[in-house]
């Protein structure tokens, strides 16, 4: 079975821009927040990590800051961009710890979970 990517369109209707090549992010580990039907977590929101959000994520059981070399994961730090699950972003908004969003690198499928208005409130620019 081959995995078919959804079209690479961002929340603004344009071409999806890369989120991060270092560290390499995305469901497909292609540097972009591309998605598909198999991406049940909807890793579609390109965010800029903060120490506050990393601590919050670790508290919830998803430690994104500790390196895991056995998986090729270097661990994230403040300032790194990363494709975050849309539902986790929405949860962080509710807890007032949401990181900033790179709209051009956020996949349109994020809009199935997060309102564009909310994404824009946390936009980088």
Image (cartoon, helix red, strand yellow):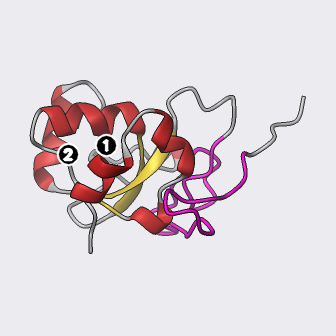
Which percent across, then down, holds residue 37? 69, 30
Which percent across, then down, holds residue 84? 40, 45
Q: Which label was assigned to residue 64? A: 1
Predominant secondary structure in magenta?
Answer: loop
Q: Is residue 45 above or below residue 19?
A: above
Let me know if residue 123 is in the magenta part.
no
Q: Can residue 8 be seen by looking at this rendering?
A: yes
Q: Is residue 19 above or below residue 71?
A: below
Task: Quadrant for the N terminus, please.
Answer: top right
Q: Badge 2: few (under 14), some or many (20 or more) residues near its Cα, within 10 Å?
A: many
Q: Nearer the viewer, residue 20 or 33?
A: 33
Tell me where the magenta segment starts and ends, as one range.
6-35
Which percent across, then down, holds residue 40? 57, 26
Q: Nearer the viewer, residue 9 or 54?
A: 9
| Nearer-N-terminus badge (1/2) | 2
Q: Residue at x 52, y 50 (%)?
A: 72
Let me know if residue 34 is in the magenta part.
yes
Residue at the extreme bottom: 125
Q: Which label was assigned to residue 119? A: none
Residue at the extreme right: 1
Q: Secondary structure at mark 1?
A: loop
Q: Is residue 87 left or right of residue 2?
A: left
Which percent across, then down, holds residue 73? 45, 49
Task: Quadrant for the C terminus, please.
Answer: bottom left
Q: Residue at x 52, y 69 (%)?
A: 21
Task: Please give the residue where the numbered disc 2 appears in the rendered image.
Answer: 54
Q: Tell me the quarter of the picture where residue 2 sits.
A: top right
Q: Is residue 74 left or right of residue 21?
A: left
Q: Badge 1: few (under 14), some or many (20 or more) residues near its Cα, within 10 Å?
A: many
Q: Can residue 63 be seen by looking at this rendering?
A: no
C-alpha separation, residue under disc 1 versus residue under disc 2: 6 Å
Q: Are marks 1 and 2 in contact (CB under 8 Å)?
A: yes
């Amino acid at each position: 079975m081959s995995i078919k990517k959804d079209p690479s369109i961002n929340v603004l209707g344009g071409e999806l821009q890369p989120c991060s090549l270092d560290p390499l992010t995305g469901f497909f580990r292609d540097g972009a927040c591309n998605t598909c039907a198999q991406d049940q977590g909807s890793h579609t929101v390109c965010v800029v990590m903060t120490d506050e959000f990393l601590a919050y994520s670790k508290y919830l059981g998803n430690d994104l800051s500790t390196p895991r070399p056995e998986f090729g994961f270097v661990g994230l730090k403040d300032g790194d961009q990363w494709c975050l699950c849309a539902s986790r972003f929405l949860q962080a908004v509710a807890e007032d710890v949401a990181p900033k969003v790179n709209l051009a690198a956020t996949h349109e499928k994020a809009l199935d979970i997060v309102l564009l208005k909310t994404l824009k409130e946390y936009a980088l620019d």
